[in-house]
Amino acid sequence: MIIDFHTHIGHFGRSAEHVIKHHRYYGGGKSVVLPIEPGDSTATDVLDDSWATEHALAAYDEYGDEIIPFCHVNPLALDALDQIRRYHATGKVRGFGEHKVRLAVDHPISMDIYRLCGEFGWPVLLHLQYREYNYNFEAFEAVLQACPETVFIGHATAWWANVSADAPSDYRAPDYVSYPTGPVVRVGLTDRLLEEYPNIYGDISAGSGFGALSRDREFGRDFVRRHRTKLLWATDCPCRDGEGNWGEGRQRECFAAQSLPLLRDYCESEEHFADITYRNAERVLGL
Ligand SMILES: [Zn+2]
Ligand SMILES: [Zn+2]
């Protein structure tokens, strides 16, 4: 049993069937399907609805409990909050995100959305990336304090670079990198937030999550041990089958084929591995 906490329909042409195939390849389980609604402030093109919420809901209708649908809205839509209320009324949705928007992480409309999700008991998955999306990571701690009822899930480059206290944050600097490598300097902001706030979790998907856990193995092992109840296994993998088929003839290593062996190595017990690969997710999702 595994729960992949970060998948997309629409990603490199991925379908619901590809999402299902992917987690079944790794022994079966469930996938959280994260829409990104098209809009001028969001990461998906305003004319591209292939990542839209409707597809996550349709996948749930077709495949049932193997699909855990989240919803997303264009936060600048005038009826953004009412759209979210309507998704809640369907009874199918389990959370909000991926909130990947060209706004400050503490933008007033996002704060309203976070609070509404807190009322619904929905986790909010944020893409945190300097310059681009929820770009002012330094404001995130105040968001956690202002929305204690809302469970947040951190993802992407700014979130994971900050496992190290020397994370590059000035994207104008000539030596700026968004995927830092090498030894981690204790204690990074992300590490401290996971330690201090019960309402923040980390999704270990993609190159950013894998990089943070693998760049300094002594740190990585210790981090995974200390945050055993706060990490969620996830892939964000574009591949269609678990075997690295990215479609249109592209073949790359599957993200799960990288992260699962690393976790196996780091986790001290089967219980520890189960926490990160599905039990923490079940708790966050209220399953
Ligand atoms: Zn994603
Ligand atoms: Zn894959």
Image (cartoon, rainbow, N blue to C red):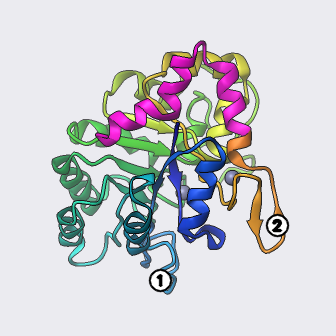
| The label number, if any, that marks residue 121 in the structure image | none
Residue 120 colored in magenta in the image: no
The relative height of residue 116 versus residue 45 in the rendered view (above or below) is: above
Some atom of ligand 2 lies within 8 Å of the CB belonging to the residue at label 2: no
The relative height of residue 230 versus residue 2 in the rendered view (above or below) is: above
Q: Residue at horizontal 74%, vertical 64%?
A: 246
Residue under pointer 2: 250
Q: Secondary structure at mark 1?
A: loop
Instruction: Say which of 102 and 166 sits in front.
Output: 102
Q: Crowdedness of circle 1 by 10 Å Cα count: few (<14), some, many (20+)? A: few
- Report if the CB atoms under discs 1 and 2 are less than 8 Å apart: no
Amino acid type for the residue under numbered disc 1: Val
Q: Secondary structure at mark 2?
A: strand
- Would you say the magenta stretch is mainly helix, strand or loop? helix
Amino acid type for the residue under numbered disc 2: Arg
What stretch of residues is rendered in magenta? Answer: 258-287
Q: Residue at horizontal 54%, vertical 52%?
A: 129
The relative height of residue 185 versus residue 43 in the rendered view (above or below) is: above
Q: Is residue 124 left or right of residue 145?
A: right
Residue 90, by quadrant, is bottom left
Q: Crowdedness of circle 2 by 10 Å Cα count: few (<14), some, many (20+)? A: few
Instruction: Say which of 26 and 94 sits in front.
Output: 26
| The label number, if any, that marks residue 46 in the structure image | 1
